[in-house]
Amino acid sequence: MMESRAVEITGLRGAVALRARIGERMTAALEPIKLEPVSAHIAFFDDNGPKGGGIRCAFTVRLPYRPALRVEHTAETARLAFDGGFGALERLLERYRERERQGRRHPKKYFVAKRLSEGLPAAARASGAAKPGERRGRRKSS
């Protein structure tokens, strides 16, 4: 299961400890997602180049049949940029999981209507009760 969860890191030279931390935390964050394959790309950019300034960390998580999740954070060091962006990514993934959970809890109206019609006794159906999805004719007023 973990073989397909690739975490690709670019723009970070050296920093073996930070790379290990990124790999561990991203793998743990992507574990609850049930879709396969899940891939993550983390890119570090130096915004101002040799002039100094902030380092930007951009996260992109790709899920099959879904739009990519993208988060960016800028800070003074690569570690701070990763920690800030990772917090935002965790909140985004939690909202994603909650949305999926809510979709499973509330079945669609046609599914519910079918289940309700299966529970009706035969006498009620024979007496002229409309079936789900079937319209009754309008009464003409004289």
Image: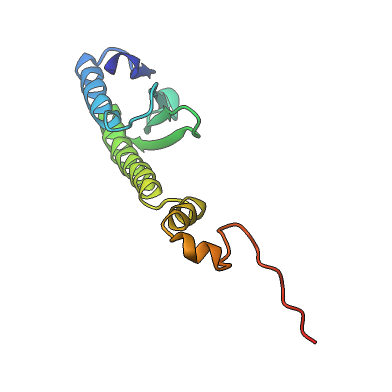
User: Residue 131, percent across and down?
Assistant: 56, 59
Quarter of the image with the N terminus in it: top left
**Image color mode:** rainbow
User: Residue 36, percent across and down?
Assistant: 38, 23
In the rendered image of this protein, does residue 16 appear above or below residue 75?
above
Outermost residue toward the bottom in this view:
142
**How many discs mark residues in the rendered view?**
0
Quarter of the image with the C terminus in it: bottom right
Q: Residue 53 versus residue 66: which sits nearer the camera?
A: 66
User: Residue 4, percent across and down?
Assistant: 35, 16
Residue at 33 percent across and 19 percent down: it is 5
**Left or right: where 33 falls relative to 118:** left
Residue at 40 percent across and 47 percent down: it is 103
**Left or right: where 6 falls relative to 17:** right
**Left or right: where 54 falls relative to 28:** right
Residue at 31 percent across and 43 percent down: it is 94
Residue at 37 percent across and 36 percent down: it is 74
User: Residue 43, percent across and down?
Assistant: 40, 23
Q: Residue 92 versus residue 84: which sits nearer the camera?
A: 92
Outermost residue toward the right in this view:
142
The quadrant in which residue 20 appears is: top left
The quadrant in which residue 112 appears is: bottom left
In the rendered image of this protein, does residue 68 appear above or below residue 100?
above
Q: Residue 128 versus residue 65: which sits nearer the camera?
A: 128
The quadrant in which residue 96 appears is: top left
In the rendered image of this protein, does residue 117 appear above or below residue 44?
below
